[in-house]
Image (tube, coloured by chain):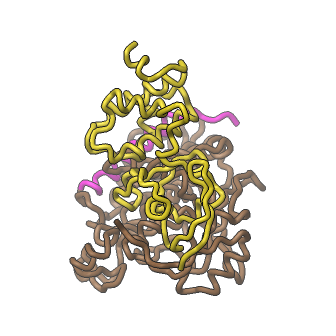
Chain colours: A yellow, B brown
Amino acid sequence: MIEALRLTVNGDTQEIGVPSHYTLLEALRYVLGYTGSKQGCDKGDCGACTVLLDGQPALSCILPVQEAIDREVTTVEGLAGPDGPHPLQDAFDLTGAAQCGFCTPGILMSAASLLQRNQSPSNHEIREALSGNLCRCTGYTKIFDAVEIAARALRENRPAAEVVRA
Amino acid sequence: MLRLHPYRYHRPKELGEALELLREHRGDSMPIAGGTDLMPNMKHGLYTPSHLVALKGVEELHVIEERDGELVIGAAETLTRVASDPLIKRRLPGLARAAEGIAHPMIRNIGTIGGNVCLDTRCTYYNQTYFWREALGFCLKKDGDVCYVVKGGSRCVAAHSADTPPMLMTLGATVDLATADGARSVPLTKFFTADGIWNTVREPDELVIRVRVPIPSPRLRTSYQKVRERKSVDFPLLGIALAVEIDDSHLIESISLVVAGLGAKPRVVGGLDKIAGGQRLTPDIIEEVARRAHRQCNPLDNLIVDTDWRHAMVAVYVRRAFEEVLGQPLAAA
Protein backbone atom coordinates (compact mmCIF):
# COMPACT_ATOMS: atom_id res chain seq x y z
CA MET A 1 0.00 0.00 0.00
CA ILE A 2 1.33 3.41 -0.96
CA GLU A 3 0.72 6.09 1.62
CA ALA A 4 0.82 9.81 0.95
CA LEU A 5 2.53 11.72 3.70
CA ARG A 6 4.34 14.95 4.35
CA LEU A 7 7.91 14.93 5.60
CA THR A 8 10.13 17.81 6.61
CA VAL A 9 13.75 16.98 5.87
CA ASN A 10 16.50 19.55 6.38
CA GLY A 11 13.90 22.30 6.52
CA ASP A 12 12.28 21.31 3.25
CA THR A 13 8.69 20.03 3.46
CA GLN A 14 7.65 17.58 0.77
CA GLU A 15 4.56 15.54 0.03
CA ILE A 16 5.63 12.02 -0.91
CA GLY A 17 4.14 8.63 -1.65
CA VAL A 18 5.84 5.74 0.18
CA PRO A 19 5.01 2.08 0.75
CA SER A 20 3.45 2.05 4.24
CA HIS A 21 5.98 -0.51 5.50
CA TYR A 22 9.01 1.66 4.68
CA THR A 23 11.35 2.85 7.39
CA LEU A 24 12.36 6.50 7.55
CA LEU A 25 15.76 5.46 6.16
CA GLU A 26 14.19 3.77 3.12
CA ALA A 27 12.04 6.84 2.49
CA LEU A 28 15.09 9.10 2.76
CA ARG A 29 17.33 7.02 0.54
CA TYR A 30 14.99 5.48 -2.00
CA VAL A 31 12.14 7.98 -2.28
CA LEU A 32 13.73 11.35 -1.49
CA GLY A 33 17.26 10.58 -2.66
CA TYR A 34 19.04 11.57 0.55
CA THR A 35 21.69 8.85 0.44
CA GLY A 36 23.91 10.42 3.12
CA SER A 37 22.36 8.34 5.89
CA LYS A 38 23.75 4.84 5.52
CA GLN A 39 22.11 1.47 5.63
CA GLY A 40 24.56 -0.56 7.71
CA CYS A 41 23.33 -3.38 9.92
CA ASP A 42 19.78 -2.22 9.12
CA LYS A 43 18.53 -3.42 12.51
CA GLY A 44 19.50 -0.82 15.06
CA ASP A 45 22.95 -1.97 16.17
CA CYS A 46 25.49 0.14 14.29
CA GLY A 47 24.25 3.75 14.17
CA ALA A 48 25.19 4.41 10.52
CA CYS A 49 21.58 5.48 9.80
CA THR A 50 21.46 8.05 12.62
CA VAL A 51 19.44 11.18 11.81
CA LEU A 52 18.07 13.90 14.07
CA LEU A 53 14.40 13.89 14.91
CA ASP A 54 13.48 17.25 16.40
CA GLY A 55 17.17 17.60 17.25
CA GLN A 56 17.51 14.21 18.99
CA PRO A 57 19.53 11.40 17.40
CA ALA A 58 17.38 8.48 16.26
CA LEU A 59 17.93 5.37 14.20
CA SER A 60 16.13 5.85 10.89
CA CYS A 61 16.54 2.17 9.91
CA ILE A 62 14.15 0.97 12.61
CA LEU A 63 11.83 3.95 12.62
CA PRO A 64 8.54 3.54 10.73
CA VAL A 65 8.41 6.44 8.26
CA GLN A 66 5.08 7.59 9.72
CA GLU A 67 6.82 8.43 13.02
CA ALA A 68 8.59 11.29 11.24
CA ILE A 69 5.33 13.03 10.30
CA ASP A 70 5.07 16.50 11.89
CA ARG A 71 8.66 16.34 13.06
CA GLU A 72 11.88 17.94 11.83
CA VAL A 73 14.21 15.40 10.27
CA THR A 74 17.85 16.44 9.86
CA THR A 75 20.24 14.29 7.85
CA VAL A 76 23.94 14.78 7.22
CA GLU A 77 23.00 16.68 4.04
CA GLY A 78 21.45 19.33 6.27
CA LEU A 79 24.42 19.75 8.57
CA ALA A 80 26.44 22.29 6.60
CA GLY A 81 25.23 25.89 6.68
CA PRO A 82 25.12 28.54 3.94
CA ASP A 83 28.65 29.61 4.91
CA GLY A 84 30.21 26.18 4.49
CA PRO A 85 30.71 22.94 6.34
CA HIS A 86 29.72 22.48 9.98
CA PRO A 87 32.78 22.79 12.31
CA LEU A 88 32.40 19.08 12.97
CA GLN A 89 32.83 18.32 9.28
CA ASP A 90 35.94 20.50 9.12
CA ALA A 91 37.34 18.89 12.27
CA PHE A 92 36.73 15.39 10.91
CA ASP A 93 38.53 16.38 7.74
CA LEU A 94 41.49 17.94 9.55
CA THR A 95 42.06 15.12 12.05
CA GLY A 96 41.46 12.18 9.75
CA ALA A 97 38.47 11.12 11.83
CA ALA A 98 36.86 9.64 8.73
CA GLN A 99 38.61 6.75 7.03
CA CYS A 100 36.28 4.61 4.94
CA GLY A 101 33.59 7.12 5.88
CA PHE A 102 30.63 4.78 6.14
CA CYS A 103 29.93 5.49 9.81
CA THR A 104 30.72 9.21 9.46
CA PRO A 105 27.25 10.57 8.60
CA GLY A 106 25.75 8.86 11.66
CA ILE A 107 28.57 9.93 13.95
CA LEU A 108 28.34 13.53 12.73
CA MET A 109 24.65 13.58 13.59
CA SER A 110 25.15 12.15 17.09
CA ALA A 111 27.99 14.60 17.67
CA ALA A 112 26.02 17.56 16.27
CA SER A 113 23.19 16.81 18.68
CA LEU A 114 25.64 16.61 21.58
CA LEU A 115 27.24 19.97 20.69
CA GLN A 116 23.82 21.54 20.43
CA ARG A 117 23.06 20.52 24.03
CA ASN A 118 26.54 20.95 25.43
CA GLN A 119 29.31 23.09 23.94
CA SER A 120 31.91 21.95 26.50
CA PRO A 121 31.51 18.17 26.59
CA SER A 122 34.00 16.13 28.60
CA ASN A 123 35.74 13.20 26.93
CA HIS A 124 33.37 10.90 28.84
CA GLU A 125 30.32 12.79 27.60
CA ILE A 126 31.58 12.55 24.01
CA ARG A 127 32.12 8.79 24.37
CA GLU A 128 28.68 8.39 25.91
CA ALA A 129 26.99 10.41 23.14
CA LEU A 130 28.74 8.36 20.44
CA SER A 131 28.31 5.01 22.19
CA GLY A 132 25.67 3.90 19.70
CA ASN A 133 27.82 4.58 16.63
CA LEU A 134 30.22 1.86 15.59
CA CYS A 135 33.37 2.60 13.59
CA ARG A 136 35.58 -0.25 12.38
CA CYS A 137 38.42 1.86 10.96
CA THR A 138 39.59 4.62 13.24
CA GLY A 139 39.71 3.14 16.71
CA TYR A 140 37.62 6.20 17.72
CA THR A 141 40.52 8.28 19.07
CA LYS A 142 40.57 10.68 16.13
CA ILE A 143 36.79 10.93 16.23
CA PHE A 144 36.84 12.02 19.88
CA ASP A 145 39.63 14.49 19.05
CA ALA A 146 37.58 15.90 16.18
CA VAL A 147 34.52 16.43 18.38
CA GLU A 148 36.65 18.24 20.97
CA ILE A 149 38.14 20.46 18.27
CA ALA A 150 34.70 21.24 16.84
CA ALA A 151 33.41 22.05 20.33
CA ARG A 152 36.28 24.50 20.81
CA ALA A 153 35.71 26.01 17.38
CA LEU A 154 32.06 26.60 18.25
CA ARG A 155 32.83 27.99 21.70
CA GLU A 156 35.55 30.32 20.45
CA ASN A 157 33.66 31.13 17.28
CA ARG A 158 36.59 30.50 14.97
CA PRO A 159 37.34 27.97 12.22
CA ALA A 160 38.31 24.42 13.21
CA ALA A 161 41.51 24.83 11.17
CA GLU A 162 42.68 27.62 13.51
CA VAL A 163 41.91 25.51 16.58
CA VAL A 164 43.99 22.66 15.15
CA ARG A 165 46.94 24.98 14.37
CA ALA A 166 46.81 26.65 17.78
CA MET B 1 19.39 -4.84 3.61
CA LEU B 2 16.52 -6.26 5.66
CA ARG B 3 13.09 -5.75 4.12
CA LEU B 4 9.92 -5.46 6.13
CA HIS B 5 6.72 -7.26 5.22
CA PRO B 6 3.80 -5.06 4.06
CA TYR B 7 1.61 -3.73 6.86
CA ARG B 8 -0.78 -0.91 7.63
CA TYR B 9 0.37 1.63 10.18
CA HIS B 10 -2.44 3.03 12.33
CA ARG B 11 -1.84 6.18 14.34
CA PRO B 12 -4.67 6.52 16.85
CA LYS B 13 -4.83 9.67 18.99
CA GLU B 14 -6.83 8.15 21.84
CA LEU B 15 -6.42 5.06 23.97
CA GLY B 16 -9.94 3.78 23.25
CA GLU B 17 -9.28 3.98 19.53
CA ALA B 18 -6.00 2.06 19.91
CA LEU B 19 -7.65 -0.69 21.94
CA GLU B 20 -10.51 -0.91 19.45
CA LEU B 21 -8.05 -1.33 16.56
CA LEU B 22 -6.24 -4.11 18.43
CA ARG B 23 -9.54 -5.89 19.05
CA GLU B 24 -10.75 -5.43 15.49
CA HIS B 25 -7.54 -6.94 14.08
CA ARG B 26 -6.90 -9.40 16.91
CA GLY B 27 -4.52 -12.13 15.79
CA ASP B 28 -3.12 -10.02 12.95
CA SER B 29 -2.07 -6.83 14.72
CA MET B 30 0.54 -5.68 17.21
CA PRO B 31 0.98 -2.53 19.24
CA ILE B 32 4.14 -0.53 18.54
CA ALA B 33 5.51 2.23 20.76
CA GLY B 34 9.19 2.96 20.03
CA GLY B 35 9.53 -0.18 17.94
CA THR B 36 13.22 -0.57 18.84
CA ASP B 37 12.55 -4.21 19.75
CA LEU B 38 9.71 -4.98 17.35
CA MET B 39 11.19 -3.47 14.18
CA PRO B 40 14.39 -5.58 14.21
CA ASN B 41 12.28 -8.61 15.08
CA MET B 42 9.99 -7.92 12.14
CA LYS B 43 13.03 -7.51 9.90
CA HIS B 44 14.04 -11.02 11.00
CA GLY B 45 10.59 -12.31 10.08
CA LEU B 46 9.79 -13.12 13.71
CA TYR B 47 6.55 -11.14 13.65
CA THR B 48 4.55 -10.32 10.52
CA PRO B 49 1.32 -8.61 11.59
CA SER B 50 -0.73 -6.90 8.87
CA HIS B 51 -1.62 -4.06 11.23
CA LEU B 52 0.58 -2.03 13.53
CA VAL B 53 -1.13 0.17 16.09
CA ALA B 54 1.21 3.04 16.97
CA LEU B 55 1.06 4.26 20.56
CA LYS B 56 3.40 7.27 20.66
CA GLY B 57 0.61 9.63 19.64
CA VAL B 58 -1.76 8.48 22.39
CA GLU B 59 -1.91 11.25 24.96
CA GLU B 60 -2.99 9.02 27.90
CA LEU B 61 0.24 7.04 27.66
CA HIS B 62 2.41 10.08 28.39
CA VAL B 63 2.66 10.96 32.05
CA ILE B 64 5.23 11.08 34.83
CA GLU B 65 3.75 12.20 38.13
CA GLU B 66 3.42 11.48 41.81
CA ARG B 67 -0.09 10.39 42.74
CA ASP B 68 -1.37 8.81 45.99
CA GLY B 69 2.04 7.72 47.26
CA GLU B 70 3.03 6.27 43.92
CA LEU B 71 5.09 7.37 40.98
CA VAL B 72 3.05 6.89 37.83
CA ILE B 73 4.93 6.45 34.55
CA GLY B 74 3.04 6.33 31.25
CA ALA B 75 3.96 3.39 29.02
CA ALA B 76 4.95 5.57 26.05
CA GLU B 77 7.50 7.67 27.95
CA THR B 78 10.91 7.18 26.37
CA LEU B 79 13.78 5.53 28.21
CA THR B 80 15.77 8.76 27.83
CA ARG B 81 13.01 10.56 29.72
CA VAL B 82 12.84 7.85 32.41
CA ALA B 83 16.61 8.05 32.82
CA SER B 84 16.69 11.84 33.08
CA ASP B 85 13.37 12.95 34.58
CA PRO B 86 14.10 14.87 37.82
CA LEU B 87 11.16 13.28 39.68
CA ILE B 88 12.24 9.75 38.79
CA LYS B 89 15.87 10.51 39.56
CA ARG B 90 14.89 11.82 42.99
CA ARG B 91 12.34 9.17 43.95
CA LEU B 92 13.57 6.08 42.06
CA PRO B 93 17.26 6.60 41.29
CA GLY B 94 17.74 2.85 40.74
CA LEU B 95 15.15 2.86 37.97
CA ALA B 96 16.74 5.90 36.33
CA ARG B 97 20.13 4.16 36.37
CA ALA B 98 18.72 0.92 34.95
CA ALA B 99 17.08 2.90 32.12
CA GLU B 100 20.26 4.91 31.52
CA GLY B 101 22.20 1.73 30.83
CA ILE B 102 19.87 0.32 28.19
CA ALA B 103 21.31 -0.18 24.70
CA HIS B 104 22.60 3.21 23.48
CA PRO B 105 21.39 6.83 23.24
CA MET B 106 19.47 6.50 19.96
CA ILE B 107 17.58 3.44 21.20
CA ARG B 108 16.75 5.21 24.48
CA ASN B 109 15.53 8.30 22.61
CA ILE B 110 12.90 6.22 20.82
CA GLY B 111 12.35 3.09 22.96
CA THR B 112 9.80 3.30 25.78
CA ILE B 113 9.38 2.03 29.31
CA GLY B 114 6.23 0.12 28.28
CA GLY B 115 8.15 -1.52 25.47
CA ASN B 116 11.00 -2.43 27.81
CA VAL B 117 8.55 -4.07 30.22
CA CYS B 118 7.07 -6.04 27.29
CA LEU B 119 10.42 -6.75 25.59
CA ASP B 120 10.46 -10.02 23.67
CA THR B 121 12.70 -12.76 25.03
CA ARG B 122 16.02 -13.38 23.29
CA CYS B 123 17.99 -16.46 22.28
CA THR B 124 20.94 -17.35 20.02
CA TYR B 125 18.63 -19.45 17.87
CA TYR B 126 15.83 -16.88 17.67
CA ASN B 127 17.27 -13.40 17.07
CA GLN B 128 18.54 -14.24 13.61
CA THR B 129 17.47 -13.55 10.06
CA TYR B 130 14.94 -15.80 8.35
CA PHE B 131 17.79 -17.12 6.18
CA TRP B 132 19.85 -18.09 9.23
CA ARG B 133 16.95 -19.73 11.01
CA GLU B 134 15.84 -21.62 7.94
CA ALA B 135 19.38 -22.85 7.28
CA LEU B 136 19.70 -24.40 10.73
CA GLY B 137 16.10 -25.52 10.95
CA PHE B 138 13.50 -23.42 12.76
CA CYS B 139 13.27 -23.50 16.55
CA LEU B 140 10.52 -23.91 19.08
CA LYS B 141 9.93 -20.20 19.59
CA LYS B 142 9.30 -19.45 15.95
CA ASP B 143 8.23 -21.60 13.02
CA GLY B 144 9.69 -24.89 14.35
CA ASP B 145 9.32 -27.56 17.01
CA VAL B 146 12.88 -28.21 18.19
CA CYS B 147 14.82 -26.49 20.93
CA TYR B 148 18.52 -26.13 20.22
CA VAL B 149 19.28 -25.00 23.76
CA VAL B 150 17.71 -27.90 25.66
CA LYS B 151 17.96 -31.03 23.52
CA GLY B 152 14.53 -32.64 23.40
CA GLY B 153 13.09 -29.67 25.28
CA SER B 154 9.44 -28.82 24.75
CA ARG B 155 9.46 -25.51 26.60
CA CYS B 156 11.11 -22.40 25.18
CA VAL B 157 13.87 -21.08 27.44
CA ALA B 158 14.68 -17.81 25.62
CA ALA B 159 15.99 -15.18 28.02
CA HIS B 160 14.11 -12.25 29.50
CA SER B 161 16.46 -9.43 28.45
CA ALA B 162 14.99 -6.19 29.74
CA ASP B 163 16.72 -3.96 32.28
CA THR B 164 13.93 -2.00 33.92
CA PRO B 165 11.64 -4.88 35.01
CA PRO B 166 14.05 -6.45 37.53
CA MET B 167 14.55 -3.05 39.17
CA LEU B 168 10.82 -2.33 39.06
CA MET B 169 10.12 -5.75 40.63
CA THR B 170 12.37 -5.03 43.61
CA LEU B 171 10.53 -1.72 44.00
CA GLY B 172 7.13 -3.45 44.14
CA ALA B 173 5.80 -1.96 40.88
CA THR B 174 2.40 -2.70 39.37
CA VAL B 175 1.43 -2.54 35.69
CA ASP B 176 -1.97 -1.29 34.58
CA LEU B 177 -3.28 -3.15 31.54
CA ALA B 178 -6.27 -2.47 29.32
CA THR B 179 -8.20 -4.06 26.48
CA ALA B 180 -11.23 -2.73 24.65
CA ASP B 181 -13.30 -4.68 27.20
CA GLY B 182 -11.77 -3.47 30.44
CA ALA B 183 -8.77 -2.85 32.60
CA ARG B 184 -6.77 -4.76 35.19
CA SER B 185 -3.70 -4.29 37.33
CA VAL B 186 -0.99 -6.89 37.82
CA PRO B 187 1.96 -6.73 40.21
CA LEU B 188 5.10 -6.94 38.08
CA THR B 189 6.23 -10.03 40.04
CA LYS B 190 3.14 -11.80 38.64
CA PHE B 191 3.44 -10.28 35.13
CA PHE B 192 6.16 -12.59 33.79
CA THR B 193 5.83 -16.31 33.09
CA ALA B 194 8.44 -19.00 32.47
CA ASP B 195 7.31 -19.51 28.86
CA GLY B 196 9.98 -18.11 26.53
CA ILE B 197 7.58 -17.96 23.58
CA TRP B 198 5.34 -15.38 25.28
CA ASN B 199 6.69 -14.59 28.72
CA THR B 200 4.04 -12.24 30.08
CA VAL B 201 0.40 -12.55 31.11
CA ARG B 202 -0.44 -9.74 28.67
CA GLU B 203 -2.97 -10.79 26.02
CA PRO B 204 -2.05 -9.94 22.40
CA ASP B 205 -4.75 -7.25 22.21
CA GLU B 206 -3.97 -5.92 25.66
CA LEU B 207 -1.83 -2.85 26.33
CA VAL B 208 0.40 -1.89 29.20
CA ILE B 209 -0.91 1.60 29.96
CA ARG B 210 1.34 2.65 32.81
CA VAL B 211 3.68 1.45 35.50
CA ARG B 212 3.01 2.46 39.08
CA VAL B 213 5.79 2.36 41.67
CA PRO B 214 5.22 2.93 45.38
CA ILE B 215 7.39 5.81 46.59
CA PRO B 216 10.07 4.00 48.60
CA SER B 217 11.27 4.83 52.07
CA PRO B 218 14.21 7.24 52.04
CA ARG B 219 16.19 4.41 53.66
CA LEU B 220 15.89 2.22 50.58
CA ARG B 221 19.12 1.80 48.62
CA THR B 222 19.15 0.20 45.20
CA SER B 223 21.58 -1.09 42.64
CA TYR B 224 21.23 -2.49 39.16
CA GLN B 225 24.21 -4.40 37.80
CA LYS B 226 24.49 -6.00 34.43
CA VAL B 227 26.85 -8.15 32.44
CA ARG B 228 27.21 -7.56 28.73
CA GLU B 229 29.87 -7.90 26.11
CA ARG B 230 30.20 -4.17 25.42
CA LYS B 231 29.30 -1.32 27.76
CA SER B 232 26.90 -0.01 25.16
CA VAL B 233 24.53 -1.36 22.51
CA ASP B 234 24.24 -4.91 23.89
CA PHE B 235 21.39 -6.57 25.72
CA PRO B 236 22.20 -7.91 29.19
CA LEU B 237 23.64 -11.40 29.56
CA LEU B 238 22.74 -11.12 33.23
CA GLY B 239 20.95 -8.43 35.22
CA ILE B 240 20.94 -8.08 39.00
CA ALA B 241 18.55 -5.72 40.78
CA LEU B 242 18.95 -5.19 44.50
CA ALA B 243 16.87 -3.10 46.89
CA VAL B 244 17.82 -3.04 50.56
CA GLU B 245 16.25 -0.97 53.28
CA ILE B 246 18.84 -0.33 55.95
CA ASP B 247 18.96 2.07 58.85
CA ASP B 248 22.04 4.13 59.63
CA SER B 249 23.50 1.39 61.82
CA HIS B 250 23.28 -0.97 58.81
CA LEU B 251 20.42 -3.04 60.24
CA ILE B 252 18.49 -4.63 57.36
CA GLU B 253 14.77 -3.85 57.41
CA SER B 254 13.95 -5.44 54.06
CA ILE B 255 15.84 -6.95 51.18
CA SER B 256 14.80 -7.80 47.66
CA LEU B 257 16.92 -9.31 44.89
CA VAL B 258 15.93 -10.14 41.32
CA VAL B 259 18.13 -11.95 38.81
CA ALA B 260 17.19 -11.48 35.17
CA GLY B 261 18.66 -12.27 31.78
CA LEU B 262 19.01 -16.00 32.31
CA GLY B 263 15.64 -17.67 31.67
CA ALA B 264 12.28 -16.47 30.40
CA LYS B 265 11.19 -15.21 33.80
CA PRO B 266 13.17 -12.85 36.04
CA ARG B 267 13.90 -14.75 39.25
CA VAL B 268 13.01 -13.29 42.63
CA VAL B 269 15.66 -14.78 44.91
CA GLY B 270 13.76 -16.44 47.74
CA GLY B 271 14.37 -16.85 51.46
CA LEU B 272 16.38 -13.67 51.93
CA ASP B 273 14.33 -12.24 54.79
CA LYS B 274 15.15 -15.36 56.82
CA ILE B 275 18.91 -14.93 56.49
CA ALA B 276 19.12 -11.16 56.34
CA GLY B 277 16.01 -9.61 57.92
CA GLY B 278 16.84 -7.70 61.10
CA GLN B 279 20.54 -8.55 60.75
CA ARG B 280 23.40 -6.16 60.38
CA LEU B 281 24.63 -6.03 56.77
CA THR B 282 27.99 -7.76 57.15
CA PRO B 283 30.32 -9.38 54.60
CA ASP B 284 29.05 -12.77 55.86
CA ILE B 285 25.44 -11.87 55.12
CA ILE B 286 26.41 -10.57 51.66
CA GLU B 287 28.27 -13.81 50.98
CA GLU B 288 25.27 -15.88 52.07
CA VAL B 289 22.91 -13.88 49.83
CA ALA B 290 25.32 -14.25 46.88
CA ARG B 291 25.55 -18.03 47.50
CA ARG B 292 21.80 -18.34 47.67
CA ALA B 293 21.31 -16.39 44.42
CA HIS B 294 23.91 -18.56 42.72
CA ARG B 295 22.19 -21.73 43.95
CA GLN B 296 18.74 -20.63 42.81
CA CYS B 297 19.84 -19.68 39.29
CA ASN B 298 20.52 -22.13 36.53
CA PRO B 299 21.58 -20.43 33.28
CA LEU B 300 21.21 -22.32 30.02
CA ASP B 301 23.09 -22.06 26.76
CA ASN B 302 20.58 -19.58 25.30
CA LEU B 303 22.97 -16.65 24.78
CA ILE B 304 26.40 -16.57 23.27
CA VAL B 305 28.58 -16.74 26.39
CA ASP B 306 29.81 -19.68 28.39
CA THR B 307 27.04 -20.94 30.68
CA ASP B 308 29.27 -21.79 33.65
CA TRP B 309 30.88 -18.38 33.48
CA ARG B 310 27.48 -16.68 33.36
CA HIS B 311 26.44 -18.75 36.39
CA ALA B 312 29.59 -17.76 38.29
CA MET B 313 28.91 -14.09 37.51
CA VAL B 314 25.62 -14.21 39.46
CA ALA B 315 27.48 -14.26 42.78
CA VAL B 316 30.09 -11.76 41.57
CA TYR B 317 27.50 -9.20 40.52
CA VAL B 318 25.36 -9.69 43.64
CA ARG B 319 28.48 -8.73 45.63
CA ARG B 320 29.00 -5.70 43.37
CA ALA B 321 25.39 -4.66 43.89
CA PHE B 322 25.95 -4.71 47.66
CA GLU B 323 29.15 -2.72 47.23
CA GLU B 324 27.25 -0.05 45.34
CA VAL B 325 24.44 -0.04 47.88
CA LEU B 326 26.88 0.36 50.80
CA GLY B 327 28.58 3.24 49.03
CA GLN B 328 25.32 5.18 48.82
CA PRO B 329 24.56 7.76 51.47
CA LEU B 330 21.27 7.47 53.33
CA ALA B 331 18.69 9.86 51.95
CA ALA B 332 17.35 12.50 54.28
CA ALA B 333 13.84 11.71 55.49
Residue displayed at 71% across by 77% down: B17
Q: Which x, y percent locates residue B13?
A: 72, 69
Is residue B320 highlighted in magenta? yes
What's the magenta region?
B309-333
Residue B84 lies, with reference to residue A69, above or below; the image says: above
Q: Where, by quadrant of the figure, is residue B159 drawn?
A: bottom left
Residue displayed at 70% across by 53% down: B64
Horizontal side of B39 relative to B249 (left or right) equals left
Nearer the observer, B117 or B280: B117
Q: Which x, y percent locates residue A134?
A: 34, 46
Residue A164 lies, with reference to residue A34, above or below; the image says: above
Image quadrant holding the N terminus of chain B, namely bottom left
Image quadrant holding the C terminus of chain B, namely top right
Q: Which x, y percent locates residue B268?
A: 47, 61
Nearer the observer, A113 or B176: A113
- How many numbered marks are there? 0
Residue B199 lies, with reference to residue A30, above or below; the image says: below
Q: Is there any visible trace of residue B260 in the rendered image?
A: yes
Type of secondary structure dominating the magenta stretch = helix
Q: Which x, y percent locates residue B260?
A: 42, 60
Nearer the observer, B290 or B231: B231
Residue displayed at 73% across by 64% down: B60
Is residue A30 highlighted in magenta? no
Residue displayed at 46% across by 50% down: A50
